[in-house]
Image (tube, grey):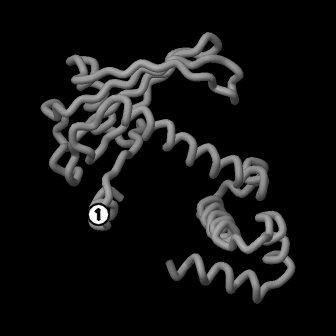
Amino acid sequence: IADKILEKGGDYFLALKGNQGDLFAQVQDQFARMEAREVYQFSDWAANHNQVVDYEVAVSQDLSWIDNAPLWANLQSLVKVTTQSPLREQENRYYISSLDKLSAQKAYELARGHWSIENQLHWQLDVTFKEDQQRHRSGNAPQNLSLIRKIVLNSAHMHQKGLSKKKILKKMAWNEQYCMEMIKKVLQL
């Protein structure tokens, strides 16, 4: 993914998760062993939790503890975002980025944007397709159906000619030819 983003002339800001094994552990160690170059602290109202959340964003350009750094195209920055609120325990999230001289404030904005995209897509899939209630759990069915739902949702999103997404999706469900035309538009991008 990082290579493809860079090929298109962009910069990446990617979330790290525990399933990324060595890299995730090395980034955690990096922040545990040394001070970040820059730290940004910010408190914000989290409407979905109805409380104030404190954010602390640390950025480091020192990749000395990252054995896999050469495997990541143009890796420049490591980011740690710590969130704390009265009703939830402290949580750390980690990111890697190709942005050189990334400021902690800019990293905060990118992280918030990342969460927003992820949350909005999940919400839309759950509300529109009731994805959380689906019971397809075996084989390739969950991934295949999720991909199909995302393609259909993107095709409805691209068609902004005075119709709501709900009406577009209903029209797609009722008219197979219209549905296939909409999906072809998305797949040709």
Residue 5 position, x and y percent, is: 33, 60
Q: How many marks?
A: 1
Q: Is residue 32 left or right of residue 149?
A: left
The residue labelled by disc 1 is 9
Q: Residue furthest bottom?
A: 177
The residue tagged with tag 1: helix, strand or loop? Answer: loop
Residue 115 position, x and y percent, is: 54, 40
In depth, the one of 134 and 38 nearer the eye is 38
Q: Residue furthest left?
A: 64
In depth, the one of 31 and 11 nearer the eye is 11
Q: Residue at x 42, y 38 (%)?
A: 17
Q: Specify whether residue 78 is in view.
A: yes
Neighbor class of circle 1 (other Cα within 10 Å; few <14, some 14-19, many 20+) is: few
* Three-letter amino acid code of the residue under disc 1: Gly
Residue 103 position, x and y percent, is: 30, 32
Which image quadrant is residue 30 in? top left
Q: Residue at x 63, y 63 (%)?
A: 150
In this view, 96 is above or below 43: below
